[in-house]
Amino acid sequence: MKHYCFLLLPEFSNLCLFNSIEPLRAANSFINGPGYRWSLISIDGSPVTSSSSFEMRVDFSIDEMLSTEKPDALIVLASYNYQRHSSRDVIRKLRTLKSRIPVLGGLDAGSYPLAKAGLLNGYQATIHWAEIETFTEKFHEIKVSNNRYVIDRNRITSGGATTALDLMLTIIRADFGQETAIAVSELLIFDTERSGSTPQRERVPAMIENKMPRLAKAIKLMERNIESPLSVAEISSQTGISQRQLERDFKESLGTTATRYYSRLRVMLAQRLLTETSLNITEIALRAGYTSRTSFIRTYKNVFKKCPSDERSKK
């Protein structure tokens, strides 16, 4: 029987956790003989509150797990405010696992504490798409990938909730064959499995991607040009969509103008950088495409009804 331990850090994603456990549970109903078991753990054995404010009881602390269990794999789950939750104690505990757990992994932003502990050095790994740029800049010893999930020897990482389900189906297939993996997929009514080599979806929602490809093309161009924003005229030229048509598409489909949508993309990036990095406000303003700290603060206050510094005061 294979034993998976899931280490929960505060503000982890419920969906990511259950998309990891439910395929294992489902697989057990199709396996003759030993299948899978799983345990939830926290750093100190205390319950952990998810990003949705659910309090999750755990089975062990890390120390208890090491003294009583011999799991085949330990998977770290982290999501919101993951840098803040990757404390010195967390990193110290993770480093003790290097030679004691056969397989280590991270889901969503769980790759970050593993990387900070030096446990992904020399490996290929991924993280949630929104954090890939920051992750790449910080950890030069890691071959960072934009793939949905990565299995590199005894390290496994994935980008988020649905990619975790893809990952677990791949693990089940390797352990118990294609027939079992298909049976699990059918039971969960999951008919959109993607390979690990599939890039993580860009921020364009599937509804826009599938039903409004012309608009999706413009949005993708905006996403690729955050630090040095393009004018609406430049976006029109590069997408081959007239400026009048482009504005009409944004108004009819999203109820806003192209300029306002672009501005929101930039300020949302700034919010993530404020909560997830230690960059100063001026650096964040530049990364979000603002040439002036003052204009950035003004825009941020208009969108979120608070100053950028208020985000930092939460830490």
Image (spheres, rainbow, N blue to C red):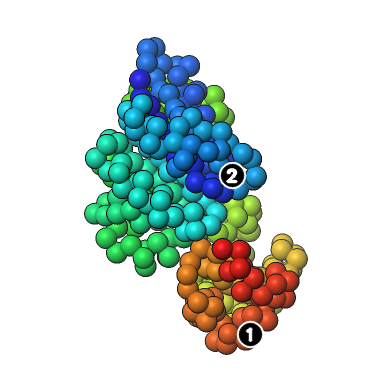
Judge left or right: residue 156 versus residue 280.
left
Quadrant occupied by the N terminus: top left
Res 50 label: 2
In the rendered structure, the answer to whether residue 307 lies left or right of residue 155 reads: right
Amino acid type at mark 1: Ser
* Quadrant in which residue 222 is drawn: bottom right
Q: Is residue 237 above or below residue 51?
A: below
Question: Which residue is at the front of the view, 120 or 126?
Answer: 120
Label 2 crowding class (10 Å Cα cut-off): few <14, some 14-19, many 20+? many
Q: Amino acid at mark 2?
A: Ser
Q: Position of residue 124 (x, y in %)?
A: 30, 52
**Residue 104, image x and y in percent?**
33, 41
> Of the residues tagged 2 and 1, which is closer to the observer?
2
Q: Quadrant of residue 134?
A: bottom left
Relative to residue 60, is residue 133 depicted above or below? below
Which residue matches tag 1?
A: 295
Locate the C terminus and report the quarter of the image it occupies. bottom right
The residue shown at (34%, 30%) is: 67
Place of residue 105 in the rendered image (x, y in percent of width and height, measured from the top left): 37, 43
Q: Is residue 35 visible?
A: yes
Q: Residue at x 45, y 32 (%)?
A: 60
Q: Which mark is residue 264?
A: none
Q: Is 287 located above or below residue 41 in the figure?
A: below
Cβ–Cβ under 8 Å for marks 2 and 1: no
Q: Earlier in the sequence, mark 2 or mark 1?
A: 2
